Amino acid sequence: MVSMEDDTSEPGEARFVALKAVVDHLVAPPEEQWQSFQQLFHARFLKEGEYFIRVGEPSEYFGFINAGLVRFFYQTPRGTEFNKSFSQENQFMGAYSAFLTNQPARFNIQALEQTHMLIAKISPIIRLFNQHPCWEKLGRLLAEQLYIKKEQREAEFLLDDAETRYRHFLEHYPDLENRLAQYHIASYLGITPVALSRIRKKRKS
Amino acid sequence: MVSMEDDTSEPGEARFVALKAVVDHLVAPPEEQWQSFQQLFHARFLKEGEYFIRVGEPSEYFGFINAGLVRFFYQTPRGTEFNKSFSQENQFMGAYSAFLTNQPARFNIQALEQTHMLIAKISPIIRLFNQHPCWEKLGRLLAEQLYIKKEQREAEFLLDDAETRYRHFLEHYPDLENRLAQYHIASYLGITPVALSRIRKKRKS
DNA sequence: GAATCGCATTAAACTAGGTTAACAACCATG
DNA sequence: CATGGTTGTTAACCTAGTTTAATGCGATTC
């Protein structure tokens, strides 16, 4: 991963390498377009436990993770938390749907590890969409990816029991198993830590 | 709704009115672009119970519904069905994610009423994306809408019990309550008809 | 090295919803 | 009219997962 000690230095170097690689791979923007895109980003660092966005706040920024791990989670009125997803290195993240619908965020985003990001205001990014079709395409591809992931998850909730969902989680995110506390995994699966513990015990035998 | 008796007449009239209105509202294509878009569509009719796509088939076509109602549903290995969503008049429908991932469809699409549609092959539509940015934008907007809907549904499965999900369904789709059999609603909510019947009884008192 | 904190495990009692089956209401059809 | 097919309701029993609480245990802090 890119080293990120200094969050105030000028753009154009190490911290943009990963972002450029991802964007190039998706839409291959011409150089001058990349420049106007890159200009919109600046570095941001989150300590473990720190929030990127909280329920009820307007969704202004989104980000690209250079290093670290964040979780997205809902809260019930009684305070129970439900993890909705995780984002890690080389992934975009933000309350995109909240921005699109112009509503306050309905979930929190919180760093689970020290997290180094590049962030940008969403509205100037959206303005880029009209400036060159490659950005419109980037928007489309990201929305499609989000949709595919959600559809997958919907299928699992409808078709699979908790044990099967856990097995799929392990297959799909083998690295996350070790980076996440078990109660975070349980919450993602839609069950309690108690139930997950039972499932784990059953699987070992 | 548009009358649709004759499915073989030339394009350019009544049956394209609704589609044009929706597309104009979303992306306002220039006239010659609309022409090349419209050319890709032709009429298709589904009898009640007929399938638009089945699990395992490649996803070649998608459609726009002029009149009628279809359901999307998964099947468990043991044959139980789970409705994933419904589409009705003035909505697009198809196994879009299956097309994007180049995989066979993972769910069925079946008409619940006589359904009049305009359908087009997906691949020439995708080719249009590079021809004019308005189509890229249309793709983005539709993917965004799909995503927002799925995220909503994910939140409900995580946060709400079956009774609350039923209440939201009634608020959100008041018209569908009467057009759908109760076991289809139950299936959409992720519960059995028996459980839905219990909930309805409880609500009446 | 003792005390504390956060997390995983286990057990016991409980509950939402599933499963099965019987029955009633409502059609369509011959 | 009788008959059968389809849908909704109800009841009895079953099960996956919740809730609460106690126990253990490794990591930090004093």
Image (tube, coloured by chain):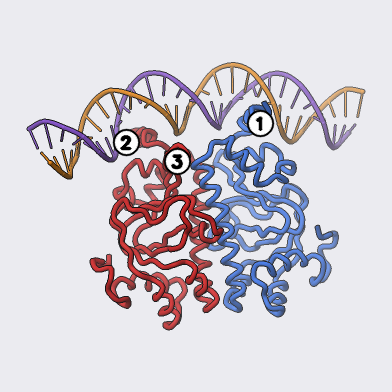
Chain colours: A blue, B red, C orange, D purple
Q: Secondary structure at mark 3?
A: loop
Placement of A140 over or under C30, stated as above or below: below
Question: Looking at this view, is A196 or A63 the one in front?
Answer: A196
Q: In this picture, is C6 found above or below A94?
A: above
What type is the residue that disc 1 sits on? Arg
Rendering quarter of residue C17: top left
Q: Which residue is mark 3?
A: B190
The amino acid sitting under disc 2 is Lys
- With respect to residue A91, does A153 lie above or below? above
Q: Residue at x 51, y 70 (%)?
A: B126
Question: In what element is the residue under mark 1?
Answer: helix
Question: Residue B187, image x and y in percent?
Answer: 40, 42
Distance in Å between CA atoms under marks 3 and 2? 21 Å
Query: What is the x, y in percent for residue C3?
Result: 83, 25
Few, some or many residues within 10 Å of mark 2 (<14, 14–19, 20+): few
Residues behind callouts 3 and 2 on a single chain = yes
Q: Chain of mark 1?
A: A
Label of residue B204 in the image: 2
Asked if residue A44 lies left or right of residue C20, the reply is right
Name the residue that disc number 1 marks.
A200
Q: Chain ID for label 3?
A: B
Mark 3 residue crowding within 10 angstroms, few (<14) / some (14–19) / many (20+): many
Q: Quadrant of the C terminus of chain B?
A: top left
